[in-house]
Structures are given as C-alpha cells and as structure tokens.
Image (tube, helix red, strand yellow):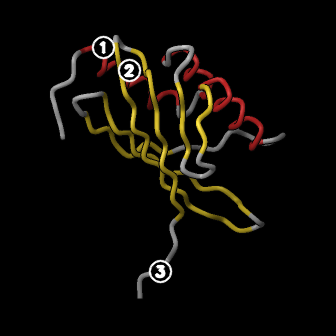
Amino acid sequence: MSSTPDQATIELSENWVKALANIDLFLEICVKDCPVWHSADDKWVSVSEAVAAVYERAGDGPVPDFRPEGITFTEMGFFNEASVELEMGGRPVKLHLVQIVEARDGKAVRVKEYIGPEMGIQP
C-alpha cells in the first residue's frame, strides 16, 4: 500500500539508492542494531555484518554495481527495487533485488531483502 512519506523517509530513500554505490553508507542510514534478512541464506544479520558480507563476496574485486530501479513508499517505509549482474560459477547472472525497508525518524530500523535470479523459464 502506498502512502505519502514524510521528508525524513524521502531523504532516507534517496540515501538508500546512493548506498547501493557506496556500501558503507548503509552503516550511517540504518540504526546500529538494524536487523537485515536475505532470502538467499534465510538468516538475520546485523547491518554491519551485511555490509561486511558484500565486501567478502567481492574479494579482491570491486563491489558489485547495483542498478537502482525504483522506490515505492509504504506506510512503514519503502520498497527499493534494484538489479545487479554478477559472475556465479563462471557464468554471468542477473539478480533482481527487492528490499523492504522499515523506516523511523529518517533511519532504517529493519530490512528484508528478496533476491531472485533471472531464470529464462518462459517459452
């Protein structure tokens, strides 16, 4: 359900999109104890653990280039849609992300991230 966001939530959503290109920014725009859930591993982690995992997965290479695809505001915060192209198992894969962000006082207080690969299953 859409709603009209307050200015703090609008600014948070703008910073959220910026954080896709500057992963450390997530540490500033989330409360310190913000829980983050990823559908890829079905576990809750802290925002600092989630940020560290991005760097760990990147290894010596660059952090993935996430492409923002839109924000939808809700009564509790917003949905962020993004995509990224990665190499997995030696093959290029495009992943789509939907992040459900619960916001309070201009900070993210809870995040769920649903990750799904393009599967090419249409006839």
In this picture, residue 88 sits left or right of residue 123: right
Query: Where, quadrant-wise, is the N terminus in this rendering?
Result: top left
Q: CA distance from mark 2 to mark 1?
A: 6 Å
In this picture, residue 52 sits left or right of residue 30: right
Residue corresponding to mark 2:
12
Query: Is label 2 in a helix, a strand or a loop?
Result: helix
Residue corresponding to mark 3:
121
Q: Earlier in the sequence, mark 3 or mark 2?
A: 2
Q: Amino acid at mark 3?
A: Ile
Q: CA distance from mark 3 to mark 1?
A: 41 Å
- Residue at 48 percent across and 49 percent down: it is 114
Say if mark 3 contacts mark 2, CB within 8 Å: no
Query: Residue 88 falls in which quadrant of the image?
Result: bottom right
In this picture, residue 19 sits left or right of residue 13: right
Query: Residue 5 falls in which quadrant of the image?
Result: top left
Near-viewer residue (114 or 55): 114
Say if mark 2 contacts mark 1, CB within 8 Å: yes
Residue corresponding to mark 1:
8
Work out which residue is located at the far right of the displayed protein and give it. 60
Q: CA distance from mark 3 to mark 2?
A: 36 Å
Q: Tell me the tag on residue 51.
A: none
**Badge 1: residue crowd in 10 Å (few <14, some 14–19, many ≥20):** some
Q: Amino acid at mark 1?
A: Ala
> Relative to 30, is 37 above or below?
below
Work out which residue is located at the far top of the displayed protein and give it. 105
- Residue at 59 percent across and 43 percent down: it is 65
Q: Position of residue 53 (x, y in %)?
A: 71, 36
Query: Is label 3 in a helix, a strand or a loop?
Result: loop
Q: Position of residue 72 (x, y in %)?
A: 27, 39
Near-viewer residue (82 or 36): 36
**Badge 2: residue crowd in 10 Å (few <14, some 14–19, many ≥20):** many
